[in-house]
Image (spheres, rainbow, N blue to C red):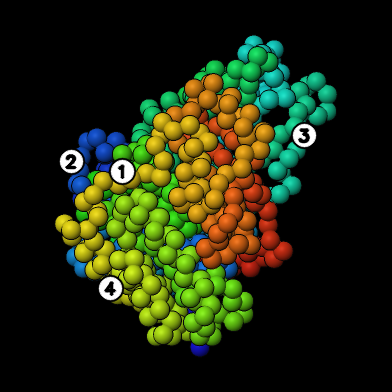
């Protein structure tokens, strides 16, 4: 049996004029800036000028990702469409795809099947140019650092301690470590340098966490770009770069309004990776969605150990947000993979492998309900090969933790396939007895020492026995505490493929330590970054990049995105 590809489905649907989508939110044509017929930006000043609603905020997260796929974005979109079908004024707020993975490993990130945001090709490619603007702002600052050193170095920057890296939104391992400024004095001062992928940059994090343009500019000014010869931090503000950087980002900061296949309004805006950054869409887009709707469904990257932890411990803490319910996406196939079943055998019923993999799901459920004290529902993204016995086993194990399971068939049926999930979401948000009326908890107290914050995340969220800090990490921690950066959140850079820092440890590993090899500061974003394992900020392309299958014909019709 053959199925239409995601892009074929997206291209077969007649889109509504974006002005019609805006009207569903009470927005007039003067409230939006048109980018063609199907995309628009909404001015963030509407948050101040229009009376707002107090929407229910629904966070979508997932189990530990596997090559079998979980369908988190697809479920997020399908749940929003289902809520719309049930008469709830709903907006979905998603992260913006990065070109790196689109051309590298996955070919697209706008949902799948009959639960997509459209225009799918635009969203997956240049869209409205936000990520290009972030790249430009990042590299303007890099240019100003090197120019300052070249022009006399009034700030006494130690060129061996320049920590600001350049950025590009393409996976390119050859740019991880470079030497620039070669070719004689006229070309600058030679030094070791490197590129990060744009969505892992601090500018992206600042962009996503800023409340408005003034807050954005203030955060940009705090970026630590280097250290002087006395060891003092040098900032973007010292270089007087924040105004020009904010000017480049002025229009990008306005959330992008698009639609789902079924015409539910969607904000797609901002998008750092949750394995190396904070992993969710912008505060501005989330707050605007909550301003204009009754229900907002959003997502955070990868599993609840990464995206959801950072959504709550960083984004919610800094922006004053609180999810009313959490959807935890899982598939029977991925759980069997976590239980040790080879990918080639996932279509076969195997209750033993499933039972071994379910503890991974249960750990994520515990994180949401017991650590963060939030109500949750497990959404099983159903595949045709799933058997009734397998589905019942998952349901029984979740019920033991007091969490309901809802089958999700949004990939094949759109919103109609998410009705059961949406009904459970509504029940959780409206049930006065559920824990949504209790105070949300964080994994750590902001005033704890840096080491203890990292230990709290590692032990409570990952299930680690303890944390091992390298001498380099301990030295940096001591330095940051002396510089006054001790009382800010921590962003863990950790593999997405395991609860541990070893991607090979599947399921729910036990008896392991987390090794922190280095600590860096993102002062503008307002958090420290703890680096574990082999995590790096510039991915490479796989043996067969997705780019090899992407093409465009003589009529401009794109194929190969999936």
Instruction: Of the two numbered discs 1 and 3 on the same chain, state the one appearing first in sequence.
Output: 3
Instruction: Of the two numbered discs 1 and 2 on the same chain, state the one appearing first in sequence.
Output: 2
Vertical arrangement, residue 244 with respect to residue 272, above or below: above
Instruction: Of the two numbered discs 4 and 3 on the same chain, state the one appearing first in sequence.
Output: 3
Toward which corner of the image does residue 218 lie, by quadrant?
top left
Residue plotted at (55% across, 61% down): 509
Q: CA distance from mark 4 to mark 3?
A: 56 Å
- Residue tagged by mark 2? 51
Q: Nearer the viewer, mark 1 or mark 2?
A: 1
- Residue tagged by mark 4? 420
Q: Label 3: few (<14), some or many (≥20) within 10 Å?
A: few
Residue plotted at (41% across, 85% down): 389
Residue plotted at (49% across, 49% down): 459
Spot occupied by residue 157 in the image (x, y as percentages of width and height): 66, 18
Q: Secondary structure at mark 4?
A: helix
Q: Nearer the viewer, mark 1 or mark 3?
A: 1
Vertical arrangement, residue 275 with respect to residue 75, above or below: above
Query: For residue 179, which numbered disc appears in the image?
Result: 3
State whether residue 96 appears in this view. no
Spot occupied by residue 193 in the image (x, y as percentages of width and height): 71, 34
Residue plotted at (55% across, 46% down): 466
Image mark count: 4
In the image, taking residue 537 as reference, residue 302 lies left or right, namely left
Q: Decide which of 36, 123 is in the foreground and name it.
A: 123
Q: CA distance from mark 1 to mark 3?
A: 43 Å
Q: Secondary structure at mark 3?
A: strand
- Residue tagged by mark 1? 321
Instruction: Of the two numbered discs 1 and 4 on the same chain, state the one appearing first in sequence.
Output: 1
Instruction: Of the two numbered discs 2 and 3 on the same chain, state the one appearing first in sequence.
Output: 2
In the image, taking residue 184 as reference, residue 480 lies left or right, namely left
């Amino acid at each position: 049996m053959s199925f239409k590809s995601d892009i074929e489905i997206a291209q077969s649907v007649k889109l509504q004029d974006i002005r019609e989508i805006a009207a569903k939110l009470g927005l007039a044509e003067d409230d939006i800036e048109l980018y063609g017929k199907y995309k628009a930006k909404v001015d963030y000043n509407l948050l101040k000028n229009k009376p707002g609603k107090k929407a229910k905020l629904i966070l979508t997260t997932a189990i530990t990702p596997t090559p079998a796929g979980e369908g988190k974005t697809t479920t997020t979109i399908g749940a929003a469409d289902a809520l719309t079908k049930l008469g709830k004024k709903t907006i979905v707020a998603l992260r913006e795809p990065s070109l790196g993975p689109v051309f590298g490993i996955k070919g697209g990130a706008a949902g799948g099947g009959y639960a997509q945001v459209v225009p799918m090709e635009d969203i997956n490619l240049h869209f409205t140019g936000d990520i290009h603007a972030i790249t430009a702002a990042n590299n303007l600052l890099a240019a100003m650092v090197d120019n300052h050193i070249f022009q006399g170095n009034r700030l006494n920057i130690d060129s061996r301690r320049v920590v600001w890296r350049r950025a590009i939104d393409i996976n390119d391992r050859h740019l991880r470590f470079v030497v620039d400024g070669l070719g004689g004095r006229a070309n600058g001062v030679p030094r070791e340098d490197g590129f990060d992928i744009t969505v892992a940059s601090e500018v992206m994090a600042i962009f996503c966490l800023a409340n408005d343009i003034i807050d954005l500019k203030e955060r940009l000014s705090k970026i630590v770009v280097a250290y002087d010869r006395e060891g003092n931090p040098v900032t973007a503000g010292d270089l007087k770069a924040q105004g020009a950087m904010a000017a480049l980002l002025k229009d990008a900061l306005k959330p992008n309004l698009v639609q789902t296949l079924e015409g539910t309004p969607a904000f797609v805006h901002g998008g750092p990776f949750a394995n190396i950054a904070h992993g969710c869409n912008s505060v501005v887009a989330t707050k605007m969605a909550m301003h204009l709707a009754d229900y907002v469904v959003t997502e955070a990257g990868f599993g609840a150990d990464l995206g959801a932890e950072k959504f709550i411990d960083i984004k919610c803490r800094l922006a004053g947000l609180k999810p009313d319910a959490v959807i935890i996406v899982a598939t029977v196939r991925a759980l069997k993979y976590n239980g040790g079943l080879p990918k080639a055998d996932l279509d076969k019923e195997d209750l033993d492998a499933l039972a071994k993999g379910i503890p991974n799901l249960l750990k994520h459920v515990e994180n949401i309900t017991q650590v963060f004290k939030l109500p949750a529902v497990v959404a099983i993204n159903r595949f045709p090969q799933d058997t009734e016995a397998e589905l019942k086993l998952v349901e029984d194990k979740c019920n033991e933790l007091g969490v309901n399971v809802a089958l999700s068939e949004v990939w094949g049926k759109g919103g109609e396939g998410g009705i059961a999930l949406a009904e459970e979401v509504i029940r959780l948000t409206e049930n006065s007895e559920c824990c949504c009326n209790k105070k949300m908890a964080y994994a750590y107290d902001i005033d704890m020492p840096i080491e203890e914050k990292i230990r709290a995340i590692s032990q409570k969220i990952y299930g680690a026995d303890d944390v091992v800090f390298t001498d380099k990490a301990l030295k940096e921690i001591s330095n940051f505490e002396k510089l006054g950066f001790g009382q800010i959140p921590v962003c863990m850079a950790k593999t997405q493929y395991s609860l541990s820092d070893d991607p090979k440890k599947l399921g729910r590993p036990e008896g392991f330590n987390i090794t922190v090899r280095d600590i860096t500061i993102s002062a503008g974003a307002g958090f420290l970054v703890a680096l574990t394992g082999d995590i790096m900020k510039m991915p490479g392309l796989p043996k067969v990049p997705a780019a090899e299958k992407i093409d465009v014909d003589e009529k401009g019709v794109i194929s190969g995105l999936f």
